[in-house]
């Protein structure tokens, strides 16, 4: 009644079962089964699956088990049918797509040609890549951060697979394995994904108290010296460029 089983994940003595429209867990590796009345009954073997208990909420993994990722006791997955991204943790299932991205996932998930997810052990983020449908090949790769409790970045790469090993973040693309957050030998270029240089941008959105007009006096920078700024433009002003020789940490507007 809850659709086919798409993903099984064993965690300690629980087997977490991801169906199309429901997520539940069953007891495993225990010398016990349950009678029809719900009472435990000791058996002579642990090769049984115990009582099935569903998590609250009508959420499932649809038919996208590739969206699944795990970090510690947190499990992440998408529910295409509900147009949401979910996190399964100790407090149950929480739709994390509601963190300022409800409209985006409502528009992109139903028509996606694929959904791939994985855990970025380097940045401690859940990364999901959503492929667009139609003749034009499009994609969106986004990251959710638990510390910020929001979707903090978009990326310019379209992976075929996402995973982490020993605190290193990897993706697979066109039959090749790529290690992220490292420079190519003999190169200082950053933002290179799958051999292609991509520009990096920062978009600042001020959405607190939308009825209040905001005046930005300065932008603070914290980091290494030797950086440069080609342009800084707002809807009311334009700042002068800053050469690498300048070490001041504040850009006056």
Image (cartoon, helix red, strand yellow):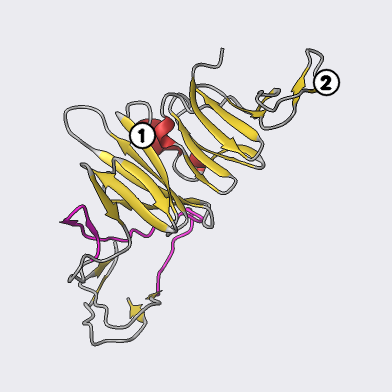
- Residue in the image at 53% along x and 21% along y: 21
**Quadrant of the image occupied by residue 192:** bottom left
Task: Write down the residue under mark 1.
Answer: 115
Residue positioned 58% across, 24% down in the render:
58
99 sits left or right of 129 in the view: right
Residue 227 x %, y %:
27, 78
Q: Nearer the viewer, mark 1 or mark 2?
A: 2
Which of marks 2 and 1 precedes in the sequence? 2
* Mark 2: few/some/many CA within 10 Å (<14, 14-19, 20+): few
| Residue 187 part of the magenta-drawn span | no
x and y percent of residue 162 in the render? 36, 45
Q: Which residue is mark 2?
A: 39
Q: Is residue 55 above or below residue 253?
A: above
Whether 152 is drawn above or below 109: the answer is below
Q: Nearer the viewer, residue 157 or 37?
A: 37
In the displayed structure, 30 sits above or below 188; it is above
User: Where are the magenta residues, as a range?
Assistant: 190-218
Marks 1/2: CA distance?
Answer: 41 Å
The kind of secondary structure the magenta stretch mainly shows is loop
């Amino acid at each position: 009644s809850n659709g086919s089983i798409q993903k099984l994940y064993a965690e300690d003595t629980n087997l977490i079962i991801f169906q199309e429209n429901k997520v539940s867990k069953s007891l495993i590796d225990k010398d016990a089964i349950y009678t029809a009345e719900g009472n435990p009954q000791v058996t002579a073997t642990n090769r049984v699956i115990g009582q099935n208990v569903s998590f609250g909420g009508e959420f499932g993994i649809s038919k996208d088990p590739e969206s699944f990722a795990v970090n510690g006791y947190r499990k992440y997955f998408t529910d295409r049918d509900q147009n949401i991204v979910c996190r399964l943790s100790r407090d149950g299932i929480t739709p994390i797509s509601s963190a300022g991205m409800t409209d985006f996932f409502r528009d992109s998930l139903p028509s996606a040609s694929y959904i791939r997810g994985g855990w970025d052990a380097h940045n401690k983020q859940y990364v999901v890549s959503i492929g667009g449908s139609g003749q034009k090949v499009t994609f969106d790769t986004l990251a959710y951060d638990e510390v910020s409790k929001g979707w903090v970045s978009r990326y310019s790469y379209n992976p075929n697979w996402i995973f982490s090993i020993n605190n290193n973040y990897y993706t697979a693309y066109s039959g090749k394995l790529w290690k992220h957050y490292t420079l190519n030998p003999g190169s200082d270029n950053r933002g290179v994904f799958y051999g292609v240089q991509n520009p990096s941008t920062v978009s600042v959105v001020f959405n607190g108290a939308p009825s209040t007009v905001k005046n930005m006096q300065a932008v603070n920078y914290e980091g290494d010296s030797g950086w440069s700024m080609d342009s800084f433009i707002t809807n009311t002003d334009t700042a002068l460029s800053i050469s690498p020789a300048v070490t001041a940490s504040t850009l006056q507007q």
